[in-house]
Image (tube, helix red, strand yellow):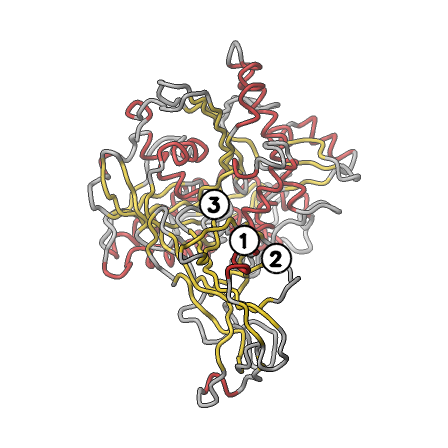
Amino acid sequence: MAQSLREPYAGSSRKLIISIDIGTTFTAASFCILQPGKVAKFEEVLRWPKQATPDAKVPSVLYYDKAGNPRAFGAETEDEDMKMEAESHEWFKAAWWKLHMRPAHLPIIKSLSLPDLPPKLTVDNVFADHLRYIKDQIKDYLVATYGEGLNIWTSLYPTMYVILTTPNGWEGKQQNRMREAAIAAGLVDATGGRRIRFVTEAEAAVLYAIDTGSVSDWLVKDGHLILCDCGGGTVDITGYRIESLEPLRLAESSASRCYLAGAVFVNQAMKAYLKERLAGTEWDNNEALTEAVQNFEKNAKKKFDDIGSVSWIPLGGFKSVPALGITRGRLRISGEDMASFFEPSIKSIKEGLDIAFENGGKLADKVILVGGLASSPWVYSQLLKWGEESGISVSRPDGPTVKAVANGALAWHIDNTVSTRYTKCHYGIRIREPYRKDDPEHRGRVPFTGADGVEYVSPCWNGIVPKNEKIDAGKEFTQSFNFEATEGDDLNHPVDIYVYRRATPPAFITFPGKKVFQPGFEVICTVRGNLEKCYRASEQRKSPLTGEKYRKVNFDVCISLGETEISARLRWIENGKAVYGPATVAYD
């Protein structure tokens, strides 16, 4: 929905919404002041300290001193004077740090590694420091842009909403860590955590492309499209069906996918190649290799488009080593070798596109490519070739701001355009089941006796939501649960929510006789609620084994997955009526 077509804000008071897109290599920020009766206007932060020319994006890079204090941020880290300061004081450079927060189930391209974090620091520390800097710059920009900017910030900051973008593969644990970092950075206070919301980078990207009108010709009711966001660290792929045009409503048509295969891994492959080829030479050191990769990034990487071509990478100096293909300080690289740097990423992109394209026979009409890696002529040509072979149109919107994800994040928050999503894995809980000696799954398990005198086995899998399930906004999924409690027990009861990432969940979560999870299982969060009222409403019983009085507490776990975060509540029967109790969702 283009901003000019957006309905005027219907609220009764002003609100400030800010969005921050922290990419692996670059960060951008936008804000919007909602005013009653006026159409929302999105504004990007276009001035950052030490920028040579104004730009909406700054490097996601920080310098830290030996004591672990941040000394330089963003564009400051590219300033030549600051680089000299960093070198003379032996500061540590933090780059690509976002990927240190990646979920364990997202492996990095084989044989490639991430730069280490500065000593004594966690990725959570770096996130908080970076977010604090971004917050200060948003404030400074807003204050400088508006005549009453300081009053606007002071009055609206206490109720400000913050939208943070994440890759498709980030889940509740990563979102919770980002929320904690945002609180530590002062974006909201400790009680304002719910004013921090998350949207996937791919969804924000497609909403921005739609918002600007750059893909208007591709929007057809009931059409299917794939958004492929080839970013710095991740490749995010999501399929959408266009449910309606006025108002615009999108529905996910397949579960979103995420690959750690972005542009930085092309650079990593290049660096590994140089290290091997230049071993034992004067360029065999980190400083020279880093400079060579930077030269590759600025020139050859952006120009390479033909496997039959030759690329030259400046190494520094004017020395020639014919045996190594070095002429006057420039290294000759064949087209085949250049293509090899891109190949792992292209392979991952094609794999994700194949899955989204097939989607149970509901074939997509077109693929929209966004992100820095998609601007590579070689990557684009290979994906065009894939499209021709698959019979699908592959398009890359024009314009340098085609992926202003921070603006798309604002559109996501205000317009609520995406109405349906798909689950990426199975969700469920662990339960006990009565022991069945004739059941092959039960035979290897040691049964135990409950307070009711029944023999049980555990931990059995009990699904709440299957993989690839269509989820409408606001839809709630429930599963019954019970436990035995006696007077004086702690009734602030926790229930672990598990995910299973493979095709079909087995009957049991662990191996027989062991506490080790079977491959594919993981605790994703814990839902906790006070069941004191439920306990009091339960029938009192007497154990046939001990004679002790107990109550069997029966309740339902209700979870919602329609947003990018899990929300939950508990439900039980009291005097014949369903009663709901609040629940918190906690992450380890």
From the viewer's perspective, is the residue at label 2 or at label 3 nearer?
2
Point out the tag, 2 or 1, that comes first from the N-terminus.
1
**At numbered mark 2, what does the secondary structure look like: helix, strand or loop?**
helix
Image quadrant holding the N terminus, namely top left
**C-alpha distance separating marks 2 and 1:** 11 Å
* Residue 294 in the image, given as x and y percentages of width and height: 57, 40
Element type at mark 3: strand
Give the residue type that dot 3 points to: Ser
Using the image as rendered, state which of residue 258 and residue 463 is in the foreground. 463
User: Which residue is label 3 attached to?
Assistant: 311
Report if the CB atoms under discs 2 and 1 are less than 8 Å apart. no
> Is residue 133 left or right of 214 when viewed as pictured?
right
Query: What is the x, y in percent for residue 569?
Result: 48, 52
Q: Of the numbered discs in the image, which one, if any, rests on residue 269?
A: 1
The number of discs equals: 3
Q: Using the numbered discs, state the Cα–Cα distance from disc 3 to disc 1 in whole angstroms.
A: 16 Å
Mark 2 / mark 3, whichever is N-terminal: 2
Question: With 318 as the anchor, is 349 left or right in this view?
Answer: left
Depth order, front residue of 581/462: 581
The image quadrant that residue 137 belongs to is top right
